[in-house]
């Protein structure tokens, strides 16, 4: 794919009254960031934006991982690369075409490194936020990604940035479309913040309720420390060869089948072999990752439900069966067990064994009613988070649909208001 392929948009249907313009036709300011600023890195100072701060799923830069620079007065490059509100950012090396937009939420002064280009368009002629949303939409992104796939050294120059093309409805319509998409983004970001807050609340409740630091109303009975070997059975996973993998057969649960402490089925492997009962799971069992190349995944746990009943689990996994799993699943997903996993891994060990699992200890109420009440309280919190995650996924899909329709003119915002 060449630069001309990248800027061609003939496949996109637009209303006949929407002309296509290139960025260069607006006589914009285009630049890329500075090299060699690592010497100015500091714990505090001005924001320094890198490719890692740009995300394909949104135009708002992700500033959770901030790098700061403290520039000396003699460094004149800051005048050229300093960002302004309304600037469009574009990654131009390696993973090219990731779009960012500088709005009032980005603190300034702020600068970019050499892997990011800045496109500054005249705001009295074109809405830069509209252009940013368009460049981040499906068809331009497909072309950017195809160009990235050519090779690791792929890049685009500033001339190519100027040749990027986009539809140009009337300015007021551009602003209205950008506003509608901004509202959709605001809804998504609000849900993300609420989910993060609810997760922190749940995490705190787990630490308190599972250690008796806080008791639920009406309970004051005794707690005991129990080893997992005393209250349940640890099962060993299935060993199979690549020759056993088949398009059909028995699903083999692996670490990828646990996402956010729940079962997931986006990445499945099936085997066409006889599976012993020892390597199968049933509703209520706990599936545990005990070996993985990524140490942070070791110990992650999910409860088996009807979707995976009778399925196999792989040799890098274990299963734990107990009548107390409605309570114990929260121990596994909290620091109660995770701290013991981390202590066992130490500096070099990259797995935990079934023997280690059996030796792990949990605190629990002697009274069954209190165990059930704790599990119920945490289940309710989890259900609330899951409902919010479902709303978030729907909001993301709605925004994606809005981008596909509004940015191509398939749906117009108060059509008559923008004519002429």
Image: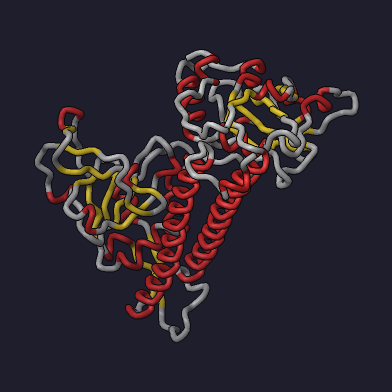
Q: Is residue 390 visible?
A: yes
Q: Closer to the camera, 289 or 161?
A: 161
Indicate the quadrant where residue 158 lies.
top right
Rendering coords of residue 163 (x, y %): 62, 19
Rendering coords of residue 234 (x, y %): 25, 54
> What residue sits 32% from the left and 78% below the top?
368
- Along the horizontal axis of the image, is 182 left or right of 362? right
In this picture the colour scheme is secondary structure
- Along the horizontal axis of the image, is 395 left or right of 243? right
Indicate the quadrant where residue 108 lies.
top right
Rendering coords of residue 134 (x, y %): 56, 35
Question: Which part of the image, by quadrant, shows the C terminus?
Answer: top right
> What residue sits 20% from the left and 37% below the top?
239
Q: Closer to the camera, 360 or 202?
A: 202
- Relative to 76, residue 350 above or below: below
Q: Closer to the camera, 47 or 300?
A: 47
Q: Closer to the camera, 264 or 55?
A: 55
Number of numbered tags placed on the structure image? 0
> What residue sits 53% from the left and 16% below the top?
154
Q: Work out which residue is located at the far left of the displayed protein and give it.
A: 274
Q: Work out which residue is located at the far front of the displayed protein and give it.
A: 420
Rendering coords of residue 95 (x, y %): 53, 25
- Relative to 41, residue 357 above or below: below
Indicate the quadrant where residue 175 lies.
top right
Q: Is residue 62 visible?
A: no
- Relative to 175, residue 69 above or below: above
Q: Work out which residue is located at the far right of the displayed protein and give it.
A: 73
- Relative to 289, residue 84 above or below: above
């Amino acid at each position: 794919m060449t630069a001309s392929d990248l800027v061609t948009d003939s496949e996109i249907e637009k209303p006949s009254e929407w002309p296509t313009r290139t960025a260069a036709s607006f006589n914009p300011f285009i630049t890329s960031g500075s090299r060699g600023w690592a010497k100015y890195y500091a714990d505090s100072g001005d924001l320094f934006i890198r490719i890692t701060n740009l995300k394909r799923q949104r135009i708002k830069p992700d500033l959770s991982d901030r790098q700061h620079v403290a520039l000396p007065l003699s460094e004149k490059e800051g005048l050229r690369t300093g960002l302004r509100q309304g600037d469009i950012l574009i990654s131009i090396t390696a993973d090219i075409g990731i779009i960012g937009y500088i709005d009032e939420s980005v603190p300034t002064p702020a600068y970019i490194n050499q892997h990011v280009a800045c496109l500054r368009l005249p705001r009295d002629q074109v809405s830069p936020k509209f252009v940013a949303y368009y460049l981040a939409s499906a068809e331009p992104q497909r072309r950017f990604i195809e160009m990235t796939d050519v090779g690791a050294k792929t890049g685009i120059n500033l001339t190519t940035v100027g040749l990027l093309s986009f539809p140009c409805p009337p300015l007021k319509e551009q602003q209205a479309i950008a506003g509608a998409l901004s509202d959709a983004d605001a809804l998504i970001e609000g849900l993300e913040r609420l989910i993060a807050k609810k997760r922190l609340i749940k995490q705190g409740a787990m630490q308190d309720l599972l250690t008796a630091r806080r008791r639920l109303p009406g309970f004051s009975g005794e707690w005991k420390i129990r080893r997992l070997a005393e209250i349940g059975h640890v099962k060993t996973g299935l060993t199979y060869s690549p020759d056993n993998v088949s398009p059909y057969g028995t699903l083999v649960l692996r670490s990828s089948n646990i996402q956010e402490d729940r079962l997931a089925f986006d990445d499945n492997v099936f085997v066409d072999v006889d599976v012993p009962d020892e390597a199968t799971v049933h509703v209520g069992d706990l599936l545990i990752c005990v070996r993985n190349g990524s140490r942070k995944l070791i110990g992650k746990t999910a409860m088996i439900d009807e979707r995976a009943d009778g399925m196999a689990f792989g040799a890098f996994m274990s299963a734990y069966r107990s009548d107390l799993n409605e309570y114990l699943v929260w121990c596994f997903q909290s620091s109660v067990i995770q701290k013991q996993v981390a202590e066992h891994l130490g500096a070099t060990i990259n797995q935990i064994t079934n023997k280690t699992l059996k030796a792990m200890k949990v605190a629990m109420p002697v009274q069954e009613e209190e165990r059930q009440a704790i599990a119920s309280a945490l289940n309710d919190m989890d259900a609330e988070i899951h409902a919010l995650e479902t709303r978030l996924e729907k909001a993301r899909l709605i925004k994606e649909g809005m981008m596909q329709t509004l940015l191509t003119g398939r749906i117009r915002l108060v059509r008559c208001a923008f004519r002429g």
